[in-house]
Amino acid sequence: MSAITVLNHATVLDVQSGELWPQRRVVIQDGRIVRLEPMSVEAPEARAAELVQLDLRGKTLLPGLIDAHVHVLAWTANLRELNNASPHYNAHRAAGIMQGMLLRGFTTVRDAAGADFGLKRAVEEGLLVGPRLFICGRALSQTGGHADSRAAGEIAVETLSTPVAFGTVVDGVPEVRRATREEIRRGADHIKLMLGGGVASPTDRLTNDQYSLEEIRAAVEEAGMADLYVMAHTYTARSVNRAIECGVRSLEHCNLIDESSVELFLKHNAWMVPTLVTYQALAQEGVSAGLPKDVEHKIYLVLDKGILALEMAYKAGVNLAYGTDLLGAMHRCQLEEFAIRAQVQPNLEVIRAATLYAARLLRAEGHLGVVAPGAYADLIAVEGNPLEDIRVLTNPGRHLKLVMKGGTVYHQVH
């Protein structure tokens, strides 16, 4: 029989009901939770050598956090520099970024362009320490789109890191189909499309629509045939609306949506993944982190709009998941998204966005995002009550006492 880990005297946050359950025991075996019960229930029997017990008295236990929009390869905010670096160097930098995410309490992340099957395999085999990775491989971009990192005077598309780059440039329905199939072949969990202009891209405008409706539908159809879904980079109401109407399931950023977008989110049961902290971080230190000075002005077109879009979507009941989209040195701000969202949402809803709801987005309900029998033993313990004070989650140096992924402890403070 494999070893058993028992967490004793925990106050468990049930994210589904929103209730705190004091004096609970969590029994873990083979990487999953097998029992969740009051301490008054008789403890499991096991030989001393097979039993590890941890006392979580005075701590709140909740599911490991899920960030649904990251770029684990993005060690710089200069995407051209990233694309021109050696893929081996990029992987080495990604290792440090992923370890940092895990030690902040993020036990699962959805990569939104860049991470490939090799990084995912390295994490799964324990060669690298990091969160569970859900990957799209390379984002698909039209010529001059958000993942086309060429300056106006450049011609070459292929770079040193093209096989594992941030994105790939493809035009036309046949090429979009081929590229989608290629990412699926390479192990994608979802497909990423760039459907509007972006802050970091050198030759587009934020108000650009990108890809024709036929191209979008082609990618959605190919993903659907593989039982996957499409996520899309979008800012404006027009780009969001085009995407939803073509069957895109997960809409990223969405800072400039309007009521027509909210109606479509609800009609199609689509997901919105705001990434508010990245604009705050970019405004404060984007250029020093590598963002080209000549695109800095784009930050301010979306900086103050995102919180209004979040509030509009939340009040209407749109599906919301937690995302950050940070680059370079700004990855350290990953937990600050909690505080930003808590300005317009109850703490519980923000926590659900990073646990229960994010797991639904990833189609991993029951496996991730909950403390329940059958779920992976992806857990964090904090000192304090995050339902009362969201800062319990934003200051890991002070409050984070345990990080466990798959039953393995990666961080513990007694």
Image (tube, grey):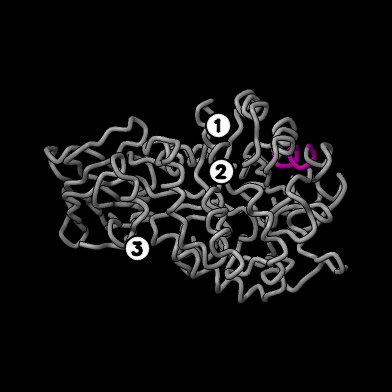
Tell me, yes or no, whether the two marked residues, 2 and 1, touch with CB atoms within 8 Å: yes
Q: Amino acid at mark 2?
A: Pro
Dot label at residue 274: 2
Q: Are marks 1 and 3 in contact (CB under 8 Å)?
A: no
Q: Alpha-carbon neighbours of circle 2 within 10 Å: few (<14), some, or many (≥20)?
A: many
Q: Which residue does the image show at 33% across and 50% down from the upper left? A: 391
Task: Determine whether, in the image, residue 38 is placed left or right of residue 89.
Answer: left
Answer with mark 1 or mark 3, whichever residue precedes in sequence. Answer: 1
Say which amino acid is labelled 3. Tyr
- Badge 1 element: helix
Q: Which residue is mark 3?
A: 410
Q: CA distance from mark 2 to mark 1?
A: 10 Å
Q: The magenta stretch spans which residues?
A: 217-223
Q: Helix, strand, or loop for circle 2?
A: loop
**Disc 1 and disc 3: Cα gap in Å?**
36 Å
Look at discs 1 and 3 and give the one toward the viewer.
1
Q: Mark 3 to mark 2: distance in Å? A: 28 Å
Q: Where's residue 114, x and y in %?
A: 64, 60
In this view, the residue in front, 13 or 390, is 390
The disc, 2 or 1, on the residue closer to the chain's N-terminal end is 2
Identity of the residue drawn at 72% across and 47% down: 193
Query: Residue 178 in magenta?
Result: no
Q: Which residue is mark 1?
A: 313
Looking at this view, is 180 or 98 the one in front? 98
Question: Label 1 sits on what residue type?
Answer: Ala
Tell me where residue 276 appears, x and y as whole percent.
54, 48
At 69% from the left and 57% from the top, the residue drawn is: 138
Tell me what residue is drawn at x 43 percent, y 54 percent: 335
Q: Earlier in the sequence, mark 3 or mark 2?
A: 2
